[in-house]
Image: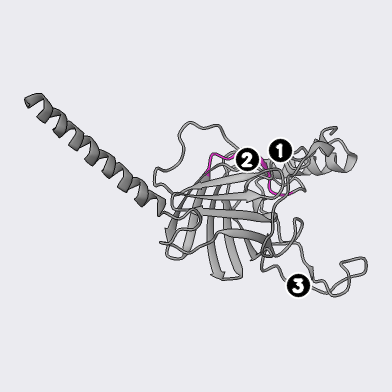
Amino acid sequence: MRGLSWWVRLASVLCMASAGAAALAASAMKDPLYGDPAHPNISGMWNPEFAYFGPPVGAPATVPQAGGPPSGMPRFTRPAPPKLTPPYAKKFTTWSKNFETGTQEPDTVTRCLAFGIARFGTMPVEIIQTPGQVTMSLGVLHDIRRIYMDGIGHTVGAEPSFNGDSVGRWEGDTLVVETDNIRAATIDRDGIPYSDKLTVIERIRRVSPTRLEIETLLTDPEAFAEPYAIKRAYTPMPPGSRFEEYLCENNRDL
């Protein structure tokens, strides 16, 4: 009887443990797959207000000129580039000369590598927001950024990458993202360089149901004489929008 009593008690404990695990599993399933109910929802598929070669938000408008955009489309002045330190200004001059003569190696996008964090916001993007992570995926090059919201902090010992290591936190209705461990690249397709000392702070805010704004501050003590700010805005893509598979094989002969 004592042995039977022991088995009964063991079975009871196992049943309670199973019930507890089932309760935890049921509770976990209540967590949303998309969105974070504790904070503003920035999930969705977003189009930049200006295309890849367009200016950041706030660039002053100018009068359309001959040979410019079709009638009815705005013409904007090109935003001032970052102020480069002397060594990087020289590097940029060399890049430009080589580009004109056709001897400059193509940029990372042309080589099917990545846009890099400074150029990431120039293309349509899908944002998937979950309580522990915000994932940003471009419709081209399968370029993905992961913004970790788990409170652990930056990854230790990782190799530098084009999009770096991003951690985020909420400040009211604004998602503040800090990124470091960035691989040296260019700020645009014209070859303006930055070094692997670049750090980035982004402030992402959904200002209305149909508008998302991202303010980006790039600081690079090696390449930039002073921090460089970019502001971009996005509008929702039409309902039912999808990103199709993107292949870059047409550039493999470069």
Q: Report which quarter residue 252 is drawn in.
A: top right
Residue identifier under label 1: 113
Residue stretch rendered in magenta on the structure? 180-188
Q: Residue furthest top?
A: 3
Residue at the spot 30% in from the left edge and 42% down from the top edge: 21
- Image quarter (top left, top right, bottom left or bottom right) of the C terminus: top right
Question: Reading the chain from its start, which is encountered first: label 2 or label 3?
Answer: 3
In this rendering, the answer to whether 204 lies above or below 61 is: above
Q: Main secondary structure of the magenta part?
A: loop
In this rendering, the answer to whether 78 lies above or below 207 is: above
Q: Is residue 59 visible?
A: yes
Relative side of 5 to 212, left or right: left
Inspect the magenta stretch and tell me whether residue 186 lies in it.
yes
The picture places residue 140, in percent across and down from the top left corner, at: 72, 47
Residue at the spot 22% in from the left edge and 41% down from the top edge: 16
Residue identifier under label 3: 61
**Badge 1 amino acid:** Leu
The picture places residue 202, in percent across and down from the top left corner, at: 54, 56
Q: CA distance from mark 2 to mark 1?
A: 9 Å
Q: Residues within 10 Å of mark 2 (few under 14, many from 20)?
A: many
Tag count: 3
